[in-house]
Image (tube, grey):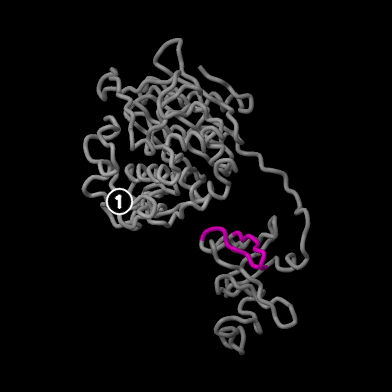
């Protein structure tokens, strides 16, 4: 019932199998399939089932619920990259008459548009989409429960609107755009809108008795972009590799990085959210991915970019088995047992003496930093002692650098020179960095006391 990848140690493979065995037993799931990828390829998969002699595998379809949202987000980012939309466009610009006011595409992607979490009754996940044929049927009489842009509030109808946006701009169905623009280029031939054998059936398990009830597998209609898809552990590992590295046929690396960048504050204790991706931290790692559920199914997909490891867990039970937690724990087992071997240190291919002269110690007021060279004429600012604001900077053709992260993201770093061409100071978003703390003669804002540094009796 288990396919063992030769790249993992036997002890790691056994730990992975033990974890899913416990999860299937304690979660009382009819079946559970899981897989782990490393450096973009599958290195382990396993399954547990209540049926003797017959187990699903990494090619068996399960419904993945809200992991579908990440696929929809990729379609929207493709429209942006092609110049057909802007993420800060109000939805009404491209899809008029929705009644969601000035809510933007970006706000819909990161669940900050203020829309309700669910559709009006009946429960959309367990009833046919034909009951909600129009956008108005999905949004109801009060589509916005909060002011757009003021809080994170997860919204299934929001992703319905994004799917309709894709259809309006592309002129084809969401399903056709998905197949043509994502699934076929990535070779995800076992990811579909309707189940294709072999696939699992969805089940509910009684909370107080070990008995099961079959769950309906409804076509969600217009709600499909929020949770329709069926997929396999193998296909989802392919998707995880794409979300890590990008693929020029689908979405470039810079755009997938944008997807996994926190886009909105969340409620206390909650996880972060980017553009169609959930972000969680813990155990010294940051994971991105998504959880999913529909009646009869639970799913989890997580990726640790730093370690190059991804994990998937899929089960056919309505509740009781925390698939997203299991996937994160499988990832953690591999990372802790077999941490990534770092690449060898190598010197830069070439060095510019003028850039090299900028490296070393700099001071912002009395705070001390180091400036070092990185590849592609980049710079890295690091607080000495670990306290302070650091950042990576990329070089621009005009001779300046742009901050890439944290406080200095988007800020400009420039070298300010004296009349004789020597360096006076570094200007970083108006902050002056000098070679000495409050260096005499440098252009320190407010000037430097002519009496200089002094002791208690000075």
Q: Quadrant of the C terminus?
A: bottom right
State the residue at coordinates (70%, 76%).
423
State the residue at coordinates (30%, 49%).
98
Q: How many marks?
A: 1
Residue farthest toward the top in the current orientation of the protein: 53
Whether residue 208 appears in this view of the structure is yes
User: 329 above or below 261?
Assistant: above
Drawn side of residue 290 relative to residue 39, left or right: left
**Magenta part of the chain:** 392-406
Q: Is residue 402 magenta?
A: yes
State the residue at coordinates (21%, 48%).
141
Q: Is residue 47 magenta?
A: no
- Percent across and percent down for residue 42 are 58, 29
Asked which secondary structure carries label 1, the reply is: loop
State the residue at coordinates (66%, 72%).
415
Residue occupied by mark 1: 97
- Quadrant assignment, res 292: top left
Residue farthest toward the front in the current orientation of the protein: 171
Q: Nearer the viewer, residue 310 or 227?
A: 227
Q: Residues within 10 Å of mark 1 (few under 14, many from 20)?
A: few
């Amino acid at each position: 019932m288990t396919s063992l990848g030769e790249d993992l140690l036997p002890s790691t493979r056994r730990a992975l199998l033990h974890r899913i065995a416990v999860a299937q037993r304690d979660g009382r799931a009819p079946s559970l399939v899981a897989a782990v990828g490393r450096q973009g390829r599958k290195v382990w998969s396993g399954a547990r089932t209540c049926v003797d002699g017959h187990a699903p595998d990494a090619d068996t379809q399960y419904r993945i619920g809200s992991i579908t949202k990440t696929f929809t987000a990729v379609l929207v980012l493709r429209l942006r990259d092609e110049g057909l939309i802007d993420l800060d466009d109000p939805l009404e610009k491209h899809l008029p008459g929705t009644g969601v006011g000035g809510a933007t595409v970006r706000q819909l992607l990161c669940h900050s548009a203020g829309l309700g979490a669910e559709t009006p009754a009946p429960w959309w996940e367990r009833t046919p989409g034909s009951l909600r044929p129009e956008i108005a049927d999905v949004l109801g009489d009060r589509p916005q429960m909060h002011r757009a842009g003021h809080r994170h509030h997860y919204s299934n109808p929001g992703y319905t609107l994004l799917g309709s946006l894709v259809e309006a701009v592309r002129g084809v169905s969401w399903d056709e755009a998905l197949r043509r623009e994502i699934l076929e280029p990535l070779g995800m031939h076992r990811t579909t809108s309707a189940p294709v054998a072999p696939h699992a059936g969805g089940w509910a398990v009684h909370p107080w008795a070990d008995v099961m009830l079959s769950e309906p597998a409804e076509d969600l209609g217009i709600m499909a972009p929020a949770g329709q898809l069926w997929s396999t552990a193998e296909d989802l590992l392919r998707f995880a590799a794409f979300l890590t590295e990008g693929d020029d046929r689908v979405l470039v690396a810079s755009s997938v990085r944008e997807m996994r960048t926190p886009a909105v504050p969340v409620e206390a204790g909650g996880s972060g959210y980017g553009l169609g991706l959930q972000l969680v931290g813990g155990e010294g790692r940051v994971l991105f991915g998504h959880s999913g559920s529909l009646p009869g199914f639970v799913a989890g997909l997580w990726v640790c970019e730093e370690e190059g490891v991804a994990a998937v867990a899929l089960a056919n039970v309505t509740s009781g088995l925390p698939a997203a937690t299991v996937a994160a724990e499988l990832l953690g087992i591999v990372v802790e047992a077999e941490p990534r071997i770092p690449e060898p240190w190598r010197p830069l291919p070439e060095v510019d003496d003028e850039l090299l002269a900028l490296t070393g110690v700099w001071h912002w007021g009395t705070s001390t930093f180091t400036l070092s060279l990185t590849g592609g004429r980049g710079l890295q600012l690091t607080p000495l002692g670990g306290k302070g604001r650091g950042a990576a900077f990329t070089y621009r053709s005009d001779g300046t650098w742009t901050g890439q992260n944290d406080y200095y993201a988007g800020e400009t770093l420039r070298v300010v020179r004296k009349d004789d061409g020597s360096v006076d100071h570094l200007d970083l978003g108006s902050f002056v960095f000098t070679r000495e703390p409050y260096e005499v003669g440098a252009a320190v804002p407010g000037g430097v006391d002519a009496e200089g540094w002094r002791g208690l009796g000075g």
